[in-house]
Image: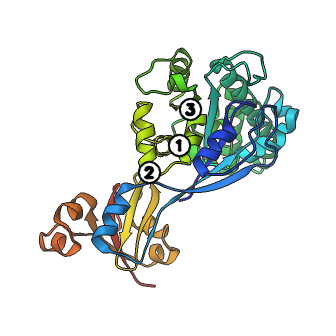
Amino acid sequence: MSLRCGIIGLPNVGKSTLFNALTSSKVPTENYPFCTIDPHVGVVKLPDQRLGSLKEIYNPNIVTHSTIEFTDIAGLVKGASKGEGLGNQFLGQIRQVNTIIHVVRCFEDKNITHVSGKVDPIGDAETIETELLLADIQTLEKQYRKTEKIAKSGDKNNQLKFSLVSALLDHCNNGNKAKTYTEDIEEIEIIKKLNLLTFKPILYVANVGESDVSENEASYFKNKLSEYAKKSDNISITLCSKLEQEIALLSEDEKDIFLKEYELSEQGLNKLIKSAFSLLELETFFTAGPKEVRSWTIKKGTIAPIAAGTIHTDFQRGFIKAEVIKYNDIIELGSEKAVKEAGLAKLQGKEYIVRDGDCIYFHFNV
Protein backbone atom coordinates (compact mmCIF):
# COMPACT_ATOMS: atom_id res chain seq x y z
CA MET A 1 0.00 0.00 0.00
CA SER A 2 1.11 3.58 -0.61
CA LEU A 3 1.62 5.59 2.55
CA ARG A 4 0.41 9.17 2.00
CA CYS A 5 0.92 11.80 4.72
CA GLY A 6 -0.51 15.31 4.69
CA ILE A 7 1.46 17.97 6.61
CA ILE A 8 -0.92 20.50 8.19
CA GLY A 9 -0.90 23.24 10.83
CA LEU A 10 -1.43 26.95 11.30
CA PRO A 11 0.55 29.34 9.08
CA ASN A 12 4.21 29.91 10.06
CA VAL A 13 4.63 26.80 12.25
CA GLY A 14 7.36 25.18 10.13
CA LYS A 15 5.36 22.91 7.80
CA SER A 16 7.24 23.79 4.62
CA THR A 17 10.59 23.70 6.40
CA LEU A 18 9.80 20.17 7.60
CA PHE A 19 8.62 19.19 4.11
CA ASN A 20 11.90 20.47 2.63
CA ALA A 21 13.87 18.46 5.20
CA LEU A 22 11.92 15.27 4.52
CA THR A 23 11.98 15.50 0.74
CA SER A 24 15.17 17.52 0.06
CA SER A 25 12.98 20.09 -1.70
CA LYS A 26 13.17 23.87 -1.84
CA VAL A 27 9.61 24.96 -1.09
CA PRO A 28 9.47 28.69 -0.15
CA THR A 29 9.32 29.30 3.62
CA GLU A 30 8.40 32.95 3.99
CA ASN A 31 7.36 34.70 7.21
CA TYR A 32 3.76 35.40 6.19
CA PRO A 33 0.52 33.37 6.06
CA PHE A 34 -0.39 31.32 2.98
CA CYS A 35 3.08 31.31 1.43
CA THR A 36 2.04 27.79 0.35
CA ILE A 37 -1.20 27.76 -1.67
CA ASP A 38 -0.92 24.88 -4.12
CA PRO A 39 0.08 21.67 -2.31
CA HIS A 40 3.64 20.45 -2.81
CA VAL A 41 4.10 16.69 -3.06
CA GLY A 42 7.32 14.77 -2.44
CA VAL A 43 7.97 11.03 -2.62
CA VAL A 44 10.66 9.66 -0.30
CA LYS A 45 12.29 6.24 -0.03
CA LEU A 46 11.43 4.48 3.21
CA PRO A 47 14.70 4.06 5.11
CA ASP A 48 15.29 0.42 6.10
CA GLN A 49 18.75 -0.86 6.98
CA ARG A 50 17.58 -4.42 6.39
CA LEU A 51 17.59 -3.81 2.63
CA GLY A 52 21.31 -3.15 2.78
CA SER A 53 21.91 -6.43 4.60
CA LEU A 54 19.81 -8.37 2.09
CA LYS A 55 21.70 -6.68 -0.74
CA GLU A 56 24.98 -8.09 0.59
CA ILE A 57 23.50 -11.59 0.65
CA TYR A 58 21.70 -11.62 -2.73
CA ASN A 59 23.90 -9.17 -4.69
CA PRO A 60 20.91 -8.09 -6.81
CA ASN A 61 20.88 -5.91 -9.91
CA ILE A 62 18.71 -3.35 -8.13
CA VAL A 63 17.40 -2.53 -4.66
CA THR A 64 13.95 -0.96 -4.46
CA HIS A 65 12.62 0.77 -1.37
CA SER A 66 8.98 1.22 -0.44
CA THR A 67 8.03 4.88 -0.62
CA ILE A 68 6.13 7.42 1.43
CA GLU A 69 4.39 10.44 -0.08
CA PHE A 70 4.35 13.78 1.78
CA THR A 71 1.98 16.61 0.86
CA ASP A 72 2.71 20.10 2.18
CA ILE A 73 -0.76 21.60 2.69
CA ALA A 74 -1.17 25.35 3.19
CA GLY A 75 -1.73 26.73 6.68
CA LEU A 76 -5.27 26.39 8.00
CA VAL A 77 -6.87 29.17 10.04
CA LYS A 78 -9.94 29.65 12.19
CA GLY A 79 -12.92 29.67 9.85
CA ALA A 80 -11.30 27.30 7.33
CA SER A 81 -14.42 25.12 7.24
CA LYS A 82 -16.33 28.20 6.03
CA GLY A 83 -13.77 29.01 3.37
CA GLU A 84 -11.51 31.38 5.31
CA GLY A 85 -7.97 31.45 3.91
CA LEU A 86 -9.02 29.17 1.02
CA GLY A 87 -9.89 26.65 3.74
CA ASN A 88 -12.29 24.54 1.69
CA GLN A 89 -9.58 23.91 -0.89
CA PHE A 90 -7.03 22.98 1.76
CA LEU A 91 -9.44 20.72 3.69
CA GLY A 92 -10.19 18.89 0.44
CA GLN A 93 -6.48 18.15 0.05
CA ILE A 94 -6.38 16.53 3.50
CA ARG A 95 -9.07 14.05 2.45
CA GLN A 96 -6.63 12.47 0.00
CA VAL A 97 -4.08 11.29 2.61
CA ASN A 98 -3.84 8.24 4.90
CA THR A 99 -2.59 10.08 7.94
CA ILE A 100 -2.24 13.65 9.12
CA ILE A 101 1.08 15.07 10.29
CA HIS A 102 0.06 18.04 12.43
CA VAL A 103 2.98 20.42 12.94
CA VAL A 104 2.56 22.51 16.08
CA ARG A 105 4.82 25.42 16.97
CA CYS A 106 6.59 24.83 20.30
CA PHE A 107 9.26 27.53 20.16
CA GLU A 108 9.50 31.23 20.88
CA ASP A 109 10.93 33.52 18.18
CA LYS A 110 10.00 37.19 17.98
CA ASN A 111 11.20 37.26 14.36
CA ILE A 112 8.60 34.70 13.23
CA THR A 113 5.01 35.90 13.28
CA HIS A 114 2.39 33.79 15.08
CA VAL A 115 -1.13 34.20 13.68
CA SER A 116 -2.66 34.60 17.15
CA GLY A 117 0.19 36.62 18.61
CA LYS A 118 1.46 34.04 21.13
CA VAL A 119 2.81 30.48 21.24
CA ASP A 120 0.06 28.17 22.51
CA PRO A 121 0.50 24.56 21.24
CA ILE A 122 -2.74 23.17 22.68
CA GLY A 123 -4.79 26.16 21.58
CA ASP A 124 -3.26 25.91 18.10
CA ALA A 125 -4.00 22.19 17.86
CA GLU A 126 -7.57 22.71 19.01
CA THR A 127 -8.10 25.50 16.45
CA ILE A 128 -7.11 23.20 13.60
CA GLU A 129 -9.08 20.24 14.86
CA THR A 130 -12.20 22.31 15.41
CA GLU A 131 -12.07 23.19 11.73
CA LEU A 132 -11.63 19.53 10.77
CA LEU A 133 -14.62 18.63 12.94
CA LEU A 134 -16.80 21.40 11.48
CA ALA A 135 -15.91 20.20 7.98
CA ASP A 136 -16.93 16.66 8.96
CA ILE A 137 -20.26 17.92 10.30
CA GLN A 138 -20.93 19.53 6.93
CA THR A 139 -20.08 16.24 5.19
CA LEU A 140 -22.34 14.28 7.54
CA GLU A 141 -25.23 16.71 7.08
CA LYS A 142 -25.05 16.12 3.32
CA GLN A 143 -24.87 12.36 3.87
CA TYR A 144 -27.84 12.56 6.26
CA ARG A 145 -30.05 14.19 3.62
CA LYS A 146 -28.87 11.73 0.98
CA THR A 147 -29.24 8.54 3.05
CA GLU A 148 -32.56 9.65 4.57
CA LYS A 149 -34.14 9.53 1.13
CA ILE A 150 -32.74 6.16 0.07
CA ALA A 151 -33.45 4.59 3.48
CA LYS A 152 -37.18 4.99 2.77
CA SER A 153 -36.85 2.33 0.08
CA GLY A 154 -36.83 -0.27 2.85
CA ASP A 155 -33.42 -1.70 1.96
CA LYS A 156 -31.75 -2.85 5.20
CA ASN A 157 -28.24 -1.77 4.18
CA ASN A 158 -29.44 1.74 3.37
CA GLN A 159 -31.37 1.90 6.63
CA LEU A 160 -28.25 0.80 8.53
CA LYS A 161 -26.16 3.49 6.85
CA PHE A 162 -28.78 6.16 7.59
CA SER A 163 -28.95 5.12 11.24
CA LEU A 164 -25.16 5.23 11.49
CA VAL A 165 -24.84 8.63 9.78
CA SER A 166 -27.55 10.06 12.02
CA ALA A 167 -25.89 8.81 15.21
CA LEU A 168 -22.43 9.88 14.00
CA LEU A 169 -23.72 13.36 13.20
CA ASP A 170 -25.03 13.70 16.76
CA HIS A 171 -21.67 12.41 18.06
CA CYS A 172 -19.72 15.05 16.11
CA ASN A 173 -22.18 17.84 16.92
CA ASN A 174 -21.37 17.17 20.56
CA GLY A 175 -17.72 18.02 19.88
CA ASN A 176 -16.42 14.47 19.42
CA LYS A 177 -14.14 13.19 16.65
CA ALA A 178 -15.48 10.56 14.25
CA LYS A 179 -12.54 8.35 15.27
CA THR A 180 -13.99 7.93 18.79
CA TYR A 181 -17.50 6.89 17.70
CA THR A 182 -17.27 3.10 17.48
CA GLU A 183 -15.07 0.01 17.61
CA ASP A 184 -17.53 -2.12 15.63
CA ILE A 185 -15.74 -3.47 12.53
CA GLU A 186 -18.78 -3.22 10.22
CA GLU A 187 -19.51 0.35 11.27
CA ILE A 188 -15.85 1.30 10.86
CA GLU A 189 -15.87 0.04 7.27
CA ILE A 190 -18.89 2.24 6.49
CA ILE A 191 -17.32 5.28 8.16
CA LYS A 192 -14.08 4.82 6.19
CA LYS A 193 -16.02 5.37 2.97
CA LEU A 194 -17.28 8.73 4.25
CA ASN A 195 -13.67 10.00 4.19
CA LEU A 196 -14.06 12.07 7.35
CA LEU A 197 -11.13 14.22 8.46
CA THR A 198 -11.46 13.48 12.19
CA PHE A 199 -11.41 9.74 11.46
CA LYS A 200 -7.83 9.95 10.21
CA PRO A 201 -4.98 9.22 12.64
CA ILE A 202 -2.83 12.20 13.61
CA LEU A 203 0.90 12.31 14.22
CA TYR A 204 1.67 15.50 16.13
CA VAL A 205 5.07 17.06 15.51
CA ALA A 206 6.25 19.42 18.24
CA ASN A 207 8.42 21.80 16.24
CA VAL A 208 10.89 23.04 18.84
CA GLY A 209 13.85 25.41 18.87
CA GLU A 210 17.45 24.23 18.76
CA SER A 211 17.83 24.47 22.55
CA ASP A 212 14.96 22.02 23.13
CA VAL A 213 15.69 19.46 20.40
CA SER A 214 17.75 17.04 22.54
CA GLU A 215 15.87 13.85 23.41
CA ASN A 216 17.14 14.32 26.97
CA GLU A 217 15.84 17.89 27.21
CA ALA A 218 12.53 18.55 28.96
CA SER A 219 10.27 21.18 27.41
CA TYR A 220 7.01 22.58 28.77
CA PHE A 221 5.50 23.00 25.31
CA LYS A 222 6.41 19.58 23.91
CA ASN A 223 5.34 17.81 27.13
CA LYS A 224 1.93 19.48 26.94
CA LEU A 225 1.53 18.41 23.32
CA SER A 226 2.53 14.84 24.17
CA GLU A 227 -0.18 14.69 26.85
CA TYR A 228 -2.72 16.14 24.41
CA ALA A 229 -1.88 13.50 21.78
CA LYS A 230 -2.22 10.60 24.23
CA LYS A 231 -5.74 11.69 25.20
CA SER A 232 -6.90 10.99 21.62
CA ASP A 233 -4.84 7.78 21.16
CA ASN A 234 -2.49 9.52 18.78
CA ILE A 235 1.30 9.96 18.84
CA SER A 236 3.53 12.98 19.40
CA ILE A 237 7.19 13.33 18.40
CA THR A 238 9.66 16.20 18.77
CA LEU A 239 11.64 17.69 15.89
CA CYS A 240 13.38 20.93 15.05
CA SER A 241 12.40 21.57 11.42
CA LYS A 242 15.19 24.08 10.98
CA LEU A 243 17.85 21.59 12.11
CA GLU A 244 16.31 18.76 10.09
CA GLN A 245 16.60 20.88 6.97
CA GLU A 246 20.29 21.45 7.72
CA ILE A 247 20.90 17.74 8.44
CA ALA A 248 19.27 16.74 5.14
CA LEU A 249 22.02 18.58 3.23
CA LEU A 250 24.92 16.80 4.99
CA SER A 251 26.91 13.71 4.04
CA GLU A 252 26.32 10.53 6.07
CA ASP A 253 29.48 11.06 8.16
CA GLU A 254 28.56 14.68 8.82
CA LYS A 255 25.05 13.64 9.82
CA ASP A 256 26.42 11.30 12.50
CA ILE A 257 28.54 14.10 13.98
CA PHE A 258 25.61 16.51 13.87
CA LEU A 259 23.24 14.05 15.60
CA LYS A 260 25.75 13.36 18.38
CA GLU A 261 26.24 17.08 18.94
CA TYR A 262 22.52 17.56 19.55
CA GLU A 263 22.13 14.28 21.51
CA LEU A 264 19.82 12.73 18.89
CA SER A 265 19.67 8.98 18.31
CA GLU A 266 18.49 9.26 14.69
CA GLN A 267 17.46 11.64 11.94
CA GLY A 268 13.98 13.11 12.25
CA LEU A 269 12.81 11.50 8.99
CA ASN A 270 13.40 8.04 10.46
CA LYS A 271 11.64 8.94 13.69
CA LEU A 272 8.66 10.39 11.82
CA ILE A 273 8.28 7.37 9.53
CA LYS A 274 8.55 4.87 12.40
CA SER A 275 5.88 6.80 14.27
CA ALA A 276 3.62 6.93 11.20
CA PHE A 277 4.05 3.16 10.73
CA SER A 278 3.14 2.57 14.36
CA LEU A 279 0.12 4.87 14.18
CA LEU A 280 -1.21 3.22 11.00
CA GLU A 281 -0.24 -0.30 12.16
CA LEU A 282 1.94 -0.95 9.14
CA GLU A 283 4.84 -3.34 8.61
CA THR A 284 7.29 -4.44 5.92
CA PHE A 285 7.95 -7.67 4.09
CA PHE A 286 10.64 -8.35 1.47
CA THR A 287 11.04 -10.11 -1.85
CA ALA A 288 14.62 -11.01 -2.70
CA GLY A 289 16.58 -12.61 -5.51
CA PRO A 290 19.46 -11.96 -7.94
CA LYS A 291 17.38 -9.51 -10.01
CA GLU A 292 15.93 -7.38 -7.23
CA VAL A 293 15.69 -6.95 -3.46
CA ARG A 294 12.58 -4.98 -2.55
CA SER A 295 10.53 -3.91 0.45
CA TRP A 296 6.72 -3.80 0.52
CA THR A 297 4.39 -2.04 2.95
CA ILE A 298 1.28 -3.79 4.33
CA LYS A 299 -1.12 -3.53 7.26
CA LYS A 300 -0.33 -5.69 10.28
CA GLY A 301 -2.44 -8.84 10.22
CA THR A 302 -2.41 -9.13 6.40
CA ILE A 303 -2.75 -12.70 5.14
CA ALA A 304 -0.39 -14.05 2.48
CA PRO A 305 -2.66 -13.78 -0.61
CA ILE A 306 -3.45 -10.12 0.16
CA ALA A 307 0.26 -9.39 0.65
CA ALA A 308 0.93 -11.06 -2.70
CA GLY A 309 -1.65 -8.73 -4.26
CA THR A 310 0.45 -5.70 -3.31
CA ILE A 311 3.01 -6.98 -5.82
CA HIS A 312 0.53 -7.86 -8.58
CA THR A 313 -3.15 -8.75 -8.67
CA ASP A 314 -2.27 -11.98 -10.54
CA PHE A 315 -0.23 -13.10 -7.52
CA GLN A 316 -3.30 -12.79 -5.32
CA ARG A 317 -5.75 -14.23 -7.85
CA GLY A 318 -3.62 -17.31 -8.55
CA PHE A 319 -2.07 -17.70 -5.09
CA ILE A 320 -0.90 -21.26 -4.31
CA LYS A 321 1.51 -20.89 -1.41
CA ALA A 322 4.14 -18.61 0.10
CA GLU A 323 7.71 -19.72 0.76
CA VAL A 324 8.73 -17.75 3.85
CA ILE A 325 12.21 -17.10 5.24
CA LYS A 326 12.61 -15.01 8.39
CA TYR A 327 14.94 -12.03 8.03
CA ASN A 328 16.89 -12.88 11.19
CA ASP A 329 17.46 -16.45 9.97
CA ILE A 330 18.96 -15.45 6.63
CA ILE A 331 21.16 -12.80 8.28
CA GLU A 332 22.40 -15.29 10.87
CA LEU A 333 23.05 -18.14 8.41
CA GLY A 334 24.28 -15.96 5.56
CA SER A 335 22.41 -17.39 2.58
CA GLU A 336 19.04 -18.63 1.40
CA LYS A 337 20.56 -22.06 0.74
CA ALA A 338 21.80 -22.35 4.33
CA VAL A 339 18.34 -21.41 5.66
CA LYS A 340 16.70 -24.11 3.55
CA GLU A 341 19.29 -26.72 4.56
CA ALA A 342 18.55 -25.89 8.21
CA GLY A 343 14.85 -26.51 7.58
CA LEU A 344 13.91 -22.94 8.43
CA ALA A 345 12.25 -22.04 5.12
CA LYS A 346 8.52 -22.69 5.55
CA LEU A 347 5.76 -23.18 2.98
CA GLN A 348 2.66 -21.29 4.11
CA GLY A 349 -0.92 -21.36 2.85
CA LYS A 350 -3.74 -18.87 2.38
CA GLU A 351 -4.33 -18.30 6.09
CA TYR A 352 -0.74 -17.38 6.92
CA ILE A 353 -0.42 -13.93 8.50
CA VAL A 354 2.64 -12.13 7.13
CA ARG A 355 5.08 -10.86 9.78
CA ASP A 356 7.35 -7.84 9.70
CA GLY A 357 10.67 -8.81 8.10
CA ASP A 358 9.40 -11.91 6.27
CA CYS A 359 11.27 -12.63 3.03
CA ILE A 360 8.70 -14.24 0.75
CA TYR A 361 8.66 -16.05 -2.57
CA PHE A 362 5.08 -16.38 -3.82
CA HIS A 363 3.98 -19.42 -5.84
CA PHE A 364 0.98 -18.69 -8.08
CA ASN A 365 -0.78 -19.87 -11.22
CA VAL A 366 -3.21 -17.94 -13.43
- Which of the two labelled residues, at mark 1 and mark 2, occupies the earlier sequence position? 1
The answer to whether one can see residue 156 in this image is: no
Residue 236, percent from left and from top: 52, 30
- 189 or 261, which lies in front? 261
Amino acid type, residue under disc 3 in the picture: Cys
**What residue does disc 2 label?**
252
Q: In the rendered structure, are the residues bearing label 2 and label 3 in contact, judged by CB atoms less than 8 Å apart?
A: no
Helix, strand, or loop for circle 2?
helix
Q: Is residue 258 left or right of residue 111?
A: left
- Which of the two labelled residues, at mark 2 and mark 3, occupies the earlier sequence position? 3
Whole-angstrom CA distance, mark 2 to mark 3, is 19 Å
- 264 or 269, which lies in front? 264
- 39 or 239, which lies in front? 239
User: In the image as oriented, which residue stretches furthest toward the bottom?
Assistant: 366
306 to 136, vertically: above or below: below
Amino acid type, residue under disc 2 in the picture: Glu
Mark 1 or mark 3, whichever is nearer to me: 1
Helix, strand, or loop for circle 1?
helix
**What residue does disc 1 label?**
247
Q: Quadrant of residue 19?
A: top right
Q: Quadrant of residue 35?
A: top right
Q: Is residue 169 left or right of residue 233?
A: right
**What residue does disc 3 label?**
240
The answer to whether one can see residue 3 in this image is: yes
Q: State the count of labels.
A: 3
Residue 357, percent from left and from top: 33, 57
132 to 222, vertically: above or below: below
